[in-house]
Structures are given as C-alpha cells and as structure tokens.
Image: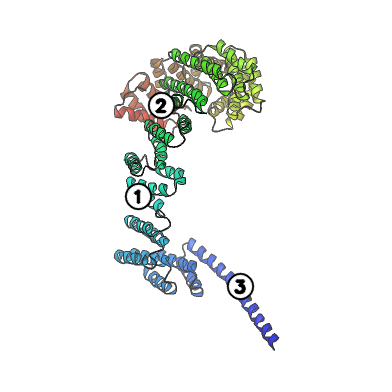
Amino acid sequence: MFTSKITYTFFIILTLTAVLFPQKNEIQNKLRLAKSFEQKGLLEEAEKIYYELHFFQPRNYQLYNYLNQILIKEKKYDNSLKLIQNQIKINKNNISLYGDLGTTYFLIGDEKKAQEVWDNALDIAPDKPFNYRIIANYLIQNRFIEKAIEVLNKGNSVSKKDPSIFSYDLANLYSLTMKFEEATVEYCKILEQKPKQLTTIKNKILGYINSNKATEQTLTTIENVYDDEENIIYLKLLVDLYLRTDNAEKALDVTEIIEKETSNNGSVIFNFAQKTARLKNHKIAAEAYKIIIDEYPNSALFSEAEIGYTRELEKELSKRVKLKDEWKPLTLSITSNSSEYKNLIKAYKVLNKKYSNNKIGWEAEFRIAKIYSEKLYEYEKADSVFQKIIDEFKTPIYINEAKFGIAKIAILKNDLQKAEKLFNEILQNRTAKQNLKIETKYYLAKVNMWKGKFTEASKLFSEVSSNPKDVHTNDALQTLLILNTFKNDSTNLILFVNTDYLVEKKNFIQASEKLKEIAENKNLFILKDFAALRYVELLLALNNYKEAVIFLEQVSNCDEDNIYKDRFLYLLGASFYYGLNQNEKALAILTKFFDEFPHSIYFGKARKIISEIKLGAGNSI
C-alpha cells in the first residue's frame, strides 16, 4: 500500500512536469509574438498577449514591465496606474514599482503626486543606499536633475561603508549642468577614499575641463582641497590636468613637491620629463631633466637625464625653426640657427666621451650624425659618423638608423646603387623597427623609380600605401597613380621622375622650371595637376610668393576640373596671409574656400587663419 502511494505521487509529479514544460515554451513563443507585434506597431495585439501572460504569471516582474511599457506607449495611463498599484499589493517592497508609479503620474501631468510617490518610496527602506540610486534614475529619466542630485546626496549620507558610493553619478550630473566646481568636489571625495582610481578620475575630469569656464573652476577647487587636506594624491591629479590645460610650468612645480615628499631620488621628475616629452612640450621636458642634473647628482637616472636634457633642447630648437615655415608643404634647408646646433653637437660630444661604452654615448653619437645631416647639411661629416656607428657595431637600433642616414646621403650624391643596397640591408634585418622599415620601403620605391624600374617601384609603393596610418601613405598613393596612368607615356613619365629626383635633392629652382613645363601641358591629365601643385609648393619654399599667387589665381579660377582645386584655393589664401601679409584678401579667399569645400582636409587650417584674422592676432607664427 505504501509503495503504491509513492508510485502514485511520483506519477503526479511526472504529469505536472510534463504539463509545465510545454507551458513554459508556450510563454516564450507568445512573448516573441508580442514583441513582433510591438515592433510592427500593432500595439493593441501586443497588449492583449502581455495581459494574458501577466495574468498567468502575476509575480513575474519582467512580464509586468512589458505590459506597463506597452500601456505607456499607448498612453493608457489609467490602465498603467491600476496595473502598478495591483503589482505593489503583490510586492510592496519593490522600489522600482514606486518609480514606475511616479513616472505614470508625471506623464498624466500630476507632477506633485509623482514627487510625493518618489519621496515616499525612499521611506520604505531608508537605510538601503541603492534604493536612492533607483529613484534618482527615475528622476533623471523624467528630467528632474536637481531632485536626482538631492536624492543621490542623501544616498551618500546613509551609506556607512562608502560615503562616496554615488559620487560618480553626482559628478556626472553636476558636469552636465555646468556645475564644474561641485563635480570636481565629488571626484575629490572618491579620490580620497579610493586613490587607485586616479587614472579613471583624471579621464572623467578631462572630459569636461576644457568646457566654458570649467578649467579655472576645476583647478582652483582641487588646489583648495589640497590646501585643506594636504593629501598628495590631489597633487598627482593636478599634474596631469595642468599639462592638458597649458599650465606646464605649474605642473613642473607640483612635480617637484611630489618628488620631495615621495621618492626624493629624481624618479618622479624623470617620469614627468618623459611624459612632457611625449606631449611634445620639449621646453618643459628639458627643464625637468635639468632639475635632476642640478639637484640629484647621485640619482641612478642622472646619465639618462643628461642625454634627455640635450635631446629635448635639440627638439625644442628644431620645433622653433620649423614653426617659421610650418604652413608650407615644402621647405628649403635652413641654416640660420647653425650656431645653436653646433653648441648641441659640443654637448653631445661631451656625453659621447663620458659614456663611450653604453647606450647614452651611442645615442649622443647618433644625434651628432643626425644634426650634421639634417640641420647643418655637412654630409661628409654626417657620413663619417654614421659609418663609425656601423663599423663599431653600436647596437642594432643605431646601426639600422645609420645605414638609413648614409643611404639618404648617397641619394643626394647621385649614388643610387649604394642607397639601394643599404635600403635592402635594412629591410632584411629583423631588428629594424617597423616604422623605419616602412620609410625605408618608401625610399627604396623612389630609388627604383628614379632608376627607371617602374614595376618594382609600383610594387613597393603599393605595399607602403596599404598602411593608412603611415605619413608616406598619401605620397605613395599619389605616385602610384601617376606611374600606373603614364606607364605607356615614357617621355612625360621620365620627365616627371627626373623632376621628382631634383626635388629630393633640394634643387628647387631647376625642378620648378621643369614642373611648370609639365603643368602647362593641358594634354597630361592628372600629371599636369600634380605638377602644378608641386610647382606652387616649390615657389612657396623659395619664398616667391608673388609668382605663386599669380599662378594659384589662374588655376583656382580655371573652369577645368582639377583634383587639387581645394588645396590650390587654400594655398592661395595662406599665401596672402602668411607670405604677403594681406589679411583682407586672405579672408575673402578662405571664406570662399569654406563655401566650396566644407569637407576638405584643409578646412581646419583655413578656419585657424580666419580666426586669427578676425581676432586681430596678426600673421606672425
């Protein structure tokens, strides 16, 4: 008898299970059907199914939510109120239900009742912080931002474990409402509790610090918090923020304080110097390295600081020299700063002698060769130093770079065979850096082109152009187009190739004469346009602004199609501004450029000139 009861019970369980599983599958099928109706805009049909499903499982919050959302979409607010109120009877402690109820009252237009519901909801479990976030989210959803801030602040105050639990939310709301001081205070609260979140907080602040009036408020707030609490974590935050808001001098001052309060061996300042160097603030980077040299002579980083200091002085000088003609696509060799470069060579020679058997001395020697080659144009001296680096096998890095330097000098000396050999050696060397290999491949393509090996050149240009981030990509694509278009027109192609070689050797006057000849040949589609562009670039490099303007006005006003028309118009405006100091003409031309070429890659540069003219900043660089 007992056994038969067990058997019967087991049978009943199996039967119920068999019934329940099909119902579960049926629910899912109906839910998919309702969603399909909803997506098609058949809301009434969807509502019927949701009601049926909710009736079947009234405690299923997801099914309730689907039904309430469809009622809201249909603006059946009275039905929504009844649904939510019935649901509250089933689960009166579900805070989200009160959030929904308040939202429906708000949609009806009863804002007072909505606020009352949301306020009362927080009394259900006032000691539970996350209830405050749930209600705050409903307030934000209905655009009660100030009220949401008030609720989140209450949530912070009741949180015993973490009094800054909602500070990220608060900071975000404050920044959205342009209350940058309050936002910064919240981030400082987090930082005090969780210093490991420094990077996250820094990135959050950087998201708004350059907004209108945000910079001063933000920095002043953090400075005041540090003055009150003297927590060094705030200084670490200030360093990065100063650097990103053009306050590098302040950043260095703060870094010195951090150095003295922490490591006191120069490492903090050294890391700062490296960071500012990466940000291309070479002047401040040099100052930082100099502090290590002057104040931390026993630091393990002293030798690195010495080479770093000289390197940053060199980069700052090069930046200053380049800035004079930065707007020009091509520039001639500039030797007016030769005395400063020679002083740098002297400094590098001291380091090379002092650290002759390690990487500091090797880098110093390499920098000497680069200055001789690229700044002073004393190619024999450069070649000699490069060759010494190769012969004495001073690390693979500098050997590959030295071979590249010698190859470039060989090009200038018309020794293309030697250049080709060295370029191939670099490409076959596994230790060569990837960016050097790409640049080497680009110049090897040019060497092949200059030697008339067009098939080999095209293959290499194609490989270079496959890397969209490389600086040589556009030139490679442009040259590849010309080679492919004029491969059957050997006369004009060779004329172009020879001219390109003259440009590489800085023989701008002779090159410009040949380019003008190509540019005036209207039968040479594409080639004449490119020749015209390069001709203008050479005139600007030669400071022949008047002739450049005359030519640019002709091509800009020509009715013929030209693939470089936007560039010609921009260069015309830039020539009037930078070259001839005629601001009104520059403004008229660049305004026309704005109207005709709103998507040009030169749009930003044109806007910069127009802003300077309108602000009366002058045209000095």
- Bin the neighbour count of mark 2 within 10 Å (Cα to Cα): few under 14, some 14-19, many 20 and up: many
Disc 1 element:
helix
* Residue type (three-letter) at the residue carrying disc 2: Tyr
Q: Answer above or below: position of 506 versus 487.
A: above
* Residue type (three-letter) at the residue carrying disc 1: Tyr
Q: Position of residue 21 (x, y in %)?
A: 61, 72
Q: Which colour style is shown?
A: rainbow
Residue for badge 3 = 22
Task: Tell me which residue sits at (66%, 26%) in the image.
Answer: 429
Q: Give yes or no for contact between labels 2 and 3 (Cβ–Cβ under 8 Å).
A: no
Q: Answer above or below: position of 437 versus 507.
A: below
- Bin the neighbour count of mark 1 within 10 Å (Cα to Cα): few under 14, some 14-19, many 20 and up: many
Location of the N terminus (image quadrant): bottom right
Considering depth in this image, is 38 or 261 the residue closer to the camera?
A: 261
Considering depth in this image, is 281 or 613 the residue closer to the camera?
A: 281
Considering depth in this image, is 151 or 524 the residue closer to the camera?
A: 151
Disc 2 to disc 3, C-alpha distance: 72 Å
Q: Position of residue 149 (x, y in %)?
A: 34, 55
Mark drawn on residue 174: 1
* Residue type (three-letter) at the residue carrying disc 3: Pro
Q: Is residue 357 left or right of residue 339?
A: right
Q: Give yes or no for contact between labels 1 and 3 (Cβ–Cβ under 8 Å).
A: no
Q: Position of residue 614 (x, y in %)?
A: 30, 29
**In this view, the mark in front (2 or 1):** 1
